[in-house]
Image: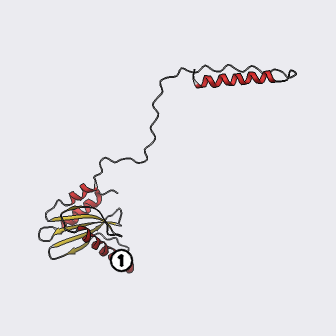
Amino acid sequence: STLSDGAAKAAAEASAAAVEAAPAETAPAPAPAAAPAAAPVAAAAPAAAPAPVAVVVEDRQSLESVLQELLVFDGAIGVALVDAQSGMVLGEAGSAGNLGLSAAGASVILRARLETNKTLGRSEEIADVLITLSTQVQIIHPLSQNPSLFLFLIGDKAKASLAMARYKAAEADHNIHL
């Protein structure tokens, strides 16, 4: 027997007991209607899966692969994704020595530039900050979707094309989804 048959039987027994316990001068309660026959139980359908909380996007590149692709131009040395407030490197690629320390210094430069813009009342966003050294070119590129993070790209000054380095930084900016 199914659970609903058991519940119907219990309800019928309780009703019959109430009729027997009723005083004689009252009219007897009508007999309970027969419980409807339970429909045959079909094979249980699989429960619907709950809606996902987050959907995995399969075509999204990993941060590591985006940073590796950023280095695919002549003269590229190293790249890092950096938190502008702390200077902490969140991801890196390439062979730049002491990239973490350089990235921390770049975060100080970016914060100073942002503070200067604020003091001057400029509401423009920074596209790139370019630094040229005797042997290197360095690009600080704040992410368009999250300006508190930036790409820090280092290239060999004698080999790297500044235009290509800036193009690759902008391309990586569009491919990073955090």
Residue 101, image x, y percentages = 26, 71
Residue 90, image x, y percentages = 30, 62
Colouring used for the render: secondary structure
Alpha-carbon neighbours of circle 1 within 10 Å: few (<14), some, or many (≥20)? some
Q: Is residue 74 left or right of residue 92?
A: left
Residue 14, image x, y percentages = 72, 24
Q: Nearer the viewer, residue 102 or 29?
A: 102
Q: Where, quadrant-wise, is the N terminus in this rendering?
A: top right
Q: Amino acid at mark 1?
A: Asn
Q: Is residue 116 left or right of residue 75?
A: right
Q: Where, quadrant-wise, is the C terminus in this rendering?
A: bottom left
Residue drawn 61% across and 19% down?
37
Q: Is residue 53 left or right of residue 162?
A: right
Q: Nearer the viewer, residue 22 or 69?
A: 22
Query: Disc 1 designates what residue?
Result: 117
Locate residue 11: give its quadrant. Answer: top right
Residue 70, image x, y percentages = 21, 60
Q: Is residue 27 above or below residue 156?
A: above
Residue drawn 15% across and 77% down?
134
Q: Is residue 164 visible?
A: no
Q: Nearer the viewer, residue 105 or 112?
A: 105
Locate residue 173: give its quadrant. Answer: bottom left
Farthest residue, direction bottom: 120
Locate residue 81: give its quadrant. Answer: bottom left
Farthest residue, direction right: 25
Q: Is residue 32 above or below residue 76?
A: above
Residue drawn 38% across and 77% down?
118
